[in-house]
Image: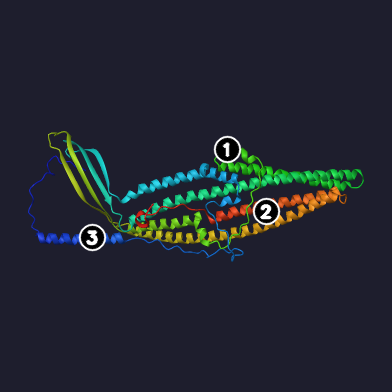
Amino acid sequence: MFWGNPSGLGRVSKPMLDPTPKRIRAGTRLRACVFACAGALAACSWHTTVPDLPKDTPADWQARNAAAAGFAPDLDHWWRAFDDPALNALIERALTDNLNIQIAGERLQAARAARHAKRSAFWPNLNFRTFVETAPNASTGYLEVGLDSTWEFGLFGRDTGNKRINLADENLAVIDEAAARVSVIAEVARNYIELRAAQARGQVLDDAVGVRRKQVELAQTRLTTRLGTQIELDHTQAELQQALNDASEPALTVLQTGQALAVLLGMTTIDPALRTASKQPQLPPIDFRQAPADLVRTRADIRRAEQNVIRAAGELGIARADLWPKLGLYSTFISSTALTGSTRLNDDFVFIAGPTISIPIVDWAARRQVVNARERALHASVLAYREAVIEGVAEAQTALAQFDTKSTLAENAQKTLELNERGAKSAQTMQRIGLGDGLETAGASLAAAQSRLQRNLAVRDRALAYIALYKAFGGTIPPMAKDRNQEGSP
């Protein structure tokens, strides 16, 4: 396009006479303005609503003893119930050093930057440019310098749809970052619990190996004194071999869980402090009662499904807007200077401003099919949200029932241990006063050791059920982004 005007076409000339009466021209302009205003108002009022999301959660969890007062769930610092400073320190380190959390944080910042950039999609823009043009007869070359501006109106719901998509994308990144934190905290706690339980179990199994060795010695002595048989000795030796095999299992668990903790902390080697055996963490008595089922809505998968509904509504709004004309304004101001040829020509400029319009004609039917597809996608996203809520409630209900069961088993294991330890002390007393022998004492000690193993596993399983329960509840989602114009704003 040739924007220069070396021949003087852009200069002011005498106006030509217009035979149209001024009154008729004024009426035509007035009607045009009225129609334009009406169309603009209709375009501004056109929007796609976000469907109301179903609430499929029961009023309360189906927990036992639901009539009594219950333990208030703490989504922010639930792991502190173990009262283990080492675990608290590990989780604090993981929240800072875990690579998955850092990756999710970077993606969140990227999503925020992208949303900020896309906010100006329907704002006026101004561009400066320079280019060279040649007259049609190739007699003169011009350097043209100018400004141009375009402004597309986000009418018929296009602007609202664009905002919803950008808002949902940012909030999905917020949810993913929060989900990464929940997952890392749960994994750190789970591996730490298993590591400490394995260390405690190793000590018990080592004690059992010692008792089995004494049994072998006693069986050997009985065989030598002809008070026992070879079968009895072989049996005790087989039990010793089995005890040795069992004692090797905790070491592998300690190695695996320690390495897993190293990965969670962004390290390649196990923390030396974790190699030293420590007391197995135990939870205090906890009974979840009257926990509101709506608590499960903090789950990342449910919040993610909610944002997918908003995004689908935004995509539907844009698809519907594509059925209507795109309206906007365009303006340009260009100055032209002759560089070659007839350089004696004066510099000239051109200023143009006016509306822009794009109307779908031939492909309107295809656009209508896109709208149909987006409507189905929105309906599917609502169903997916409902499915996420139902699955979340079911998982939390199962986790709650499992925690109740594991708590009962832990209580029973503790009672059994107390009885067997009392029996072991009685057997030692009887042997000391000459009313019992070493085999009876060894058998009672082995029963107590077996009870300690059962209690160790029951305490571990209860702790793991507690962790799974809080993971099923979901973690605290930080404040999500809102639309400044509609929600008031962060």
Which residue is drawn at the image coordinates 31% and 51% (left, top)? 122
Q: Tag 3 or tag 2, which sits nearer the N-term?
A: 3
Q: What's under tag 3, amino acid-wise?
A: Cys
Residue 373 x, y percent position in the rendering: 41, 59
Q: What's under tag 2, amino acid-wise?
A: Ala
- Of badges 1 and 2, the one in the foreground is 2
| Residue 90 in the image: above or below residue 318 | above
Q: Tag 1 or tag 3, which sits nearer the N-term?
A: 3
Q: Which is nearer the eye, 25 or 85?
A: 85
Circle 3 — which element? helix
Q: What's under tag 1, amino acid-wise?
A: Thr
Which residue is drawn at the image coordinates 52% and 53% (left, top)? 475
Check disc 3 and report the residue beneath it. 37
Report crowding for label 2: few under 14, some 14 to 19, many 20 or more residues within 10 A (C-alpha).
many
- Of badges 2 and 3, the one in the foreground is 2
| Residue 326 in the image: above or below residue 221 | below
Q: Distance between the residues labelled 1 and 2?
A: 31 Å
Residues at discs 1 and 2 in contact (Cβ within 8 Å): no
Q: What label sits on residue 458 in the rendered view? A: 2
Q: Residue furthest right?
A: 226
Which residue is drawn at the image coordinates 68% and 42% (left, top)? 251
Residue 106 x, y percent position in the rendering: 45, 44
Check disc 1 and report the residue beneath it. 268
